Image (cartoon, rainbow, N blue to C red):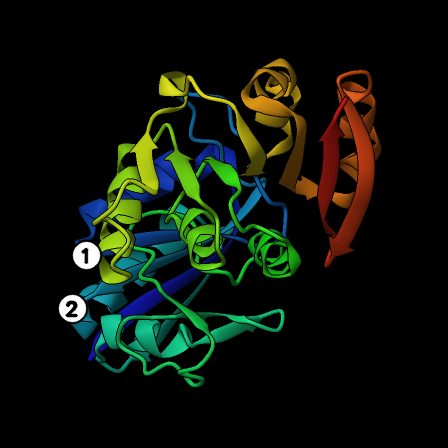
Amino acid sequence: MWYQLHIELCHKNGIDVLSEALEETGALSITLTDKNDDPVLEPEPGTTPLWPDIIVNALYAEEADALTAQIQLTTDFPNLQISRTTLADQDWERAWMDDFKPQSFGSRLWICPSWSTPPNPDAINLILDPGLAFGTGTHPTTSLCLQWLDKAHLQGKTVIDYGCGSGILALAALKLGAASVHAVDIDPQALQATQNNAESNDLLNNNQLVMGYPNELNTCVDLIIANILLSPLMSLRQRFHALLNPAGMLVVSGILTEQVDQLIEEYHGQFTHQDTISRDGWSLILFKRA
């Protein structure tokens, strides 16, 4: 059994002091979560921003330690709401695996974790373990990209997956018929995850997949797909224009629906807006190189 302190009414300015106090009481782990659904979407490089109001959960191995900590913290932090609960031990890795199940995107494509048997062996099945990188298909922006790829005519096309994360979009494009894909990301863990997932799908034994960092790109392609946030997208317009063939297409996602008009205006002149698809407050925009 594990013993947890659940602490509410925490403001971000007091988190450092509270975390230090929890460590002094012997907390084995301290977890911070958003209380009011205030997502931090685009942190500045080198910063670790927090939500305005935070829920703190601290875990203890002994019930007596949790009780002592609760009494101490109630005295030291009278404005906080502190409750104590008991958690049964479990296989946390298995619990996460149980939540990640095969998913279909469009009429042909399935994303399947490596520990699960594909439900439709005749479909285009992409075996995927996200590892430490973003991208399983569960987020609306990734889902929008996968469904767009499923309907696209990719045979013989060259593609860049800009900000590849787990490699899910790059590998899906190859599975769906792309001639070659450049998967690039600034995060080494993303490139490692992409390589691991490419190995799981037997996509490393030819020259179709090239992995690297964005500054290493020196070729023009037929399609760029970028599932990243608004701030980098706003600064990448000229770079994308230079990397696309004259009739090339650009698919961008990772933006909130209310940001769509801002991005379309920024790209006007070098790109022609073709379509916008939205779901759950997020959007995908399709451009054609002007």
Q: Nearer the viewer, residue 226 or 58?
A: 226
* Towards the viewer: 265 or 249: 249
In the picture, the disc for residue 262 is none
Quadrant of the image containing the N terminus: bottom left
The answer to whether 279 is drawn above or below residue 43 in the figure is: below
The amino acid type found where label 2 is placed reads Ala
Q: Position of residue 209 (x, y in %)?
A: 33, 41
Figure quadrant of the C terminus:
top right
CA separation in Å, label 2 and label 1: 7 Å
Q: Amino acid at mark 1?
A: Leu
Q: Please indicate, yes or no, whether residue 42 appears anywhere in the rendered image.
A: no
Visible residue check, residue 262: yes
Q: Which residue corresponds to the image point at 82% horizontal and 33% vertical from the top-left?
A: 273
The residue at 42%/17% (across/down) is: 218
Provide the secondary structure element on which disc 2 rests. loop
Residue 61: mark: 2
Q: Earlier in the sequence, mark 2 or mark 1?
A: 1
Residue 246 drawn above or below residue 286 = above
Report whether 201 appears left or right of 136. Answer: left
Q: Relative to residue 9, is residue 97 depicted above or below?
A: below
Q: Position of residue 204 (x, y in %)?
A: 23, 48
Q: Name the residue carrying label 1.
A: 28
- Residue 215 location in percent, x, y? 39, 16
**x 76%, y 28%: residue:** 263
Residues packed near mark 1 inside 10 Å, few (<14), some (14 to 19) or many (20 plus) = few
What percent of the width, then of the height, locates residue 201? 29, 61
Callout 2 touching callout 1 (CB < 8 Å): yes
Quadrant position of residue 105: bottom right
Tell me the SS state at disc 1.
Answer: loop
